[in-house]
Image (cartoon, grey):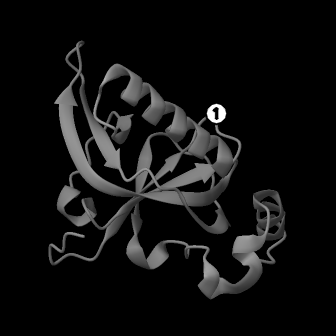
């Protein structure tokens, strides 16, 4: 992991059309399989219109936090950000992601357009062995408990 002297900064983005963490994982698996078949690098990337101006705070230590069905649900580490201009002359960028989805403690999030910065102090905690049985719960149950304010 790259250390650049900054506190990590993250990006928050809606996973439009995605109903669950498993849906996102399947999309990543399908994309990786397509890349293999076409002889492309097996990179996981997400294309977005706006280029983050604070790239140095993100690359190698920040994550893309995905909002699924109104809740921050999971994240992927951002390994690189590659600005480019598309065929119509519009500036865009590829967020290069480590293709490992990490569930986080669900947190409600209102819809928004594009993406938002997420400060490190405001990020939800990862779900893993250190926070008990939450990681063993089915995603739907975590979602419901979070909606009731019990998680």
Residue 88 on image: x %, y %: 24, 12
The local secondary structure at tag 1 comes to: loop
Taking the spot 47% from the left edge, 55% from the top edge, the residue there is 100
Between residue 62 and residue 117, name the one nearer to us. 62
Q: Left of 69 or right of it: where is 121?
A: left
Instruction: Note whether 147 is above or below 85 in the view shown.
Output: below
Identify the residue position indicated by label 1 in the image.
17
Q: Quadrant of the N terminus?
A: bottom left
Between 59 and 31, the one lying in front of the other is 31
Percent from the top left, x then y, of residue 150?
81, 78
Side (left or right) of 54 relative to 77: left
Q: How many marks?
A: 1
Percent of width and height locating residue 132: 71, 85
As rendered, which of 108 and 47 lies closer to the eye? Answer: 47
Quarter-of-image position of residue 83: top left
Badge 1 crowding class, 10 Å Cα cut-off, few under 14, some 14 to 19, many 20 or more, is few
Q: Residue at x 61, y 46 (%)?
A: 111
- Point out the residue furthest to the top here: 88
The residue under the point 19% across, 69% down is 2
Q: Quadrant of residue 5?
A: bottom left
Placement of 142 over or under 66, stated as above or below: below
- For the view shown, which residue lies furthest in the left direction? 4
In the rendered image, the quadrant that contains the C terminus is bottom right
For the point 38% across and 53% down, the residue is 98
User: Above or below — where is 138 with respect to 86?
Assistant: below
């Amino acid at each position: 992991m790259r250390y650049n002297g900054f506190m990590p900064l993250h990006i928050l983005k809606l996973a439009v059309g995605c109903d669950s963490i498993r849906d996102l994982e399947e999309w990543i698996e399908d994309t990786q399989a397509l890349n293999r078949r076409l002889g492309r690098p097996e990179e996981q990337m997400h294309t977005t219109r706006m280029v983050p101006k604070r790239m140095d705070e993100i690359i190698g230590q920040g994550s893309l936090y995905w909002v699924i069905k109104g809740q921050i649900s999971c994240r992927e580490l951002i390994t690189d950000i590659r600005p480019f201009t598309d065929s119509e002359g519009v500036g865009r960028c590829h967020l290069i992601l480590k293709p490992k989805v990490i569930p986080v403690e669900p947190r409600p999030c209102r819809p928004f357009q594009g993406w938002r910065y997420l400060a490190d102090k405001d990020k939800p905690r990862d779900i893993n062995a250190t926070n008990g049985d939450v990681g063993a719960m089915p995603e739907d149950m975590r979602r419901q408990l979070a909606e009731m304010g019990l998680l």
